Image (tube, rainbow, N blue to C red):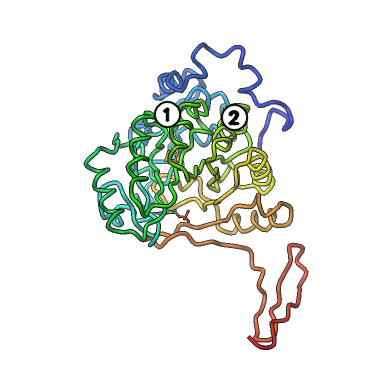
Amino acid sequence: MDNEIAPNEEPPSSRDSSDKPPGWSDWIWQLANRIKSVNELKERTGIAISAKTTEKFPLSITPYYFSLIRKFDYSDPIFKMCVPHEEELTEIMQDDPLCEDQMTPVSCLVHRYNDRALVFSTSVCSVYCRYCTRKRSVGVKDHVINDTELNGITDYLSNNPQISDVIVSGGDPFMLGTDKLVHIIEKIRSVKSVDIIRIGTKMPVVLPHRITNELVDELKLYHPIFVNTHFNHPNEFTKESKAACERLVNNGFVVGNQSVLLRGVNDDKHIQEELCRGLVKMRVRPYYLFQCDLVQGVEHFRTRVSKGIEIMEHLRGRLSGLAIPQFVVDSPGGKGKIPVMPTYLISQTPEKVVLRNYRGELVDYPEPAAY
Ligand SMILES: *Cc1c(COP(=O)(O)O)cnc(C)c1O
Ligand code: SF4
């Protein structure tokens, strides 16, 4: 990776907060001042991108996230994650590889696993990640869940009491106004069989100012709520993102991280190690490391599955289990997430198993005589 700043120097956004424009810390100001056109992008970076790409997959970058770019070039991980590239127009993949659209029994709800359901609360985000799994709809449509849809969802949940875990996803649910979001959470919480609610949001990473005291004070009334966020690279660690995560944790939210393995961004075991170490320092638990999905327009981000296995092997030897995510492939055809690991079980008989430790040494492990 091409870092112009030494790793232990303060990240840029905390370094020059004094010369930020007034309004910088206000999330509404950040949203109003997003870079949304190729012309603006050209003015700010000198890089010309064809409008054909952004007509198909829209562009949006918050001033905060833009300030984390250290070099206006695709070798910069933040730049690569948020600045469009013409390769997005390459036609080789499917629009909906996870078949989410076919597993939708009622509008805005995906029911793939017996005990869990996923709710699409909105189709917009503050920053459009170029590798987004839901590129087919996120940012392209402009949809916010309405009361009819919400009632359909609560009816479905009530009629399917085996669903105990509801994931509020999107787009980014924290794009909604606090009142609207609280209304959604309150409705889901009113279903007796729902034990836990999860919210998937990238705001701590791309617009940490959204995690206001008001937001956490209102949401914490509906605990247990888990928040899964989405850090992909250590350059995303700033004073602001740390404060956002800590505000959530301090208010009883269990915070996890789902990252995506991305070519030229974080397909490097040392970067992954730094990412995981940084997360646990903020009390954010690495949850999943996703293999990049087979989505239309993201082929240039994909790695081989073996890269993920190599990273897991590296992490297991160096980090506490608390800092190690699970590497998963979300399988095409909606067949679910499949964990993929280095091979630690070498052979198995009724008498003994042979295991391999993180240093590659073989270990004989006897089984109980009578079981
Ligand atoms: C990922 C996913 C879930 C949650 O899976 P966990 O492994 O429990 O995090 C639930 N529903 C759908 C449709 C999903 O894609
Ligand atoms: S925040 Fe999530 S849903 Fe939104 S563009 Fe990024 S990956 Fe897609």
The image shows residue 102 at horizontal and vertical percentages of 29, 56
From this view, report whether residue 253 is shown above or below residue 319. Answer: above
Q: Mark 2 to mark 1: distance in Å?
A: 23 Å
Crowding around mark 1 (Cα neighbors within 10 Å: few <14, some 14 to 19, many 20+) is many
Q: Residue furthest bottom?
A: 370
Q: Which residue is mark 1?
A: 60
The quarter of the displayed image where residue 342 is located: bottom right
Check disc 1 and report its element: helix, strand or loop: loop
Mark linked to residue 243: 2
The image shows residue 364 at horizontal and vertical percentages of 75, 78
Asked whether the residues under the numbered discs 2 and 1 touch, taking CB atoms below 8 Å apart as contact, a structural biologist would say no
The quarter of the displayed image where residue 327 is located: bottom right
Crowding around mark 2 (Cα neighbors within 10 Å: few <14, some 14 to 19, many 20+) is some
Quarter of the displayed picture in which ligand 2 can be seen: top left
Q: Residue at x 25, y 37 (%)?
A: 146
Check disc 2 and report its element: helix, strand or loop: helix
Q: Amino acid at mark 2?
A: Ala
Select label 2 or label 1 by which is in front.
2
From this view, report whether residue 71 is shown above or below residue 57. Answer: above
**In this image, 98 relative to 4: left or right?**
left
The image shows residue 181 at horizontal and vertical percentages of 37, 34
* Closest to the observer, 7 or 198: 198
The image shows residue 233 at horizontal and vertical percentages of 60, 39
* Closest to the observer, 107 or 2: 107
* Closest to the observer, 220 or 180: 220
Q: Which of the marked residues, 2 or 1, is nearer the chain's N terminus?
A: 1
Q: Residue at x 51, y 31 (%)?
A: 206
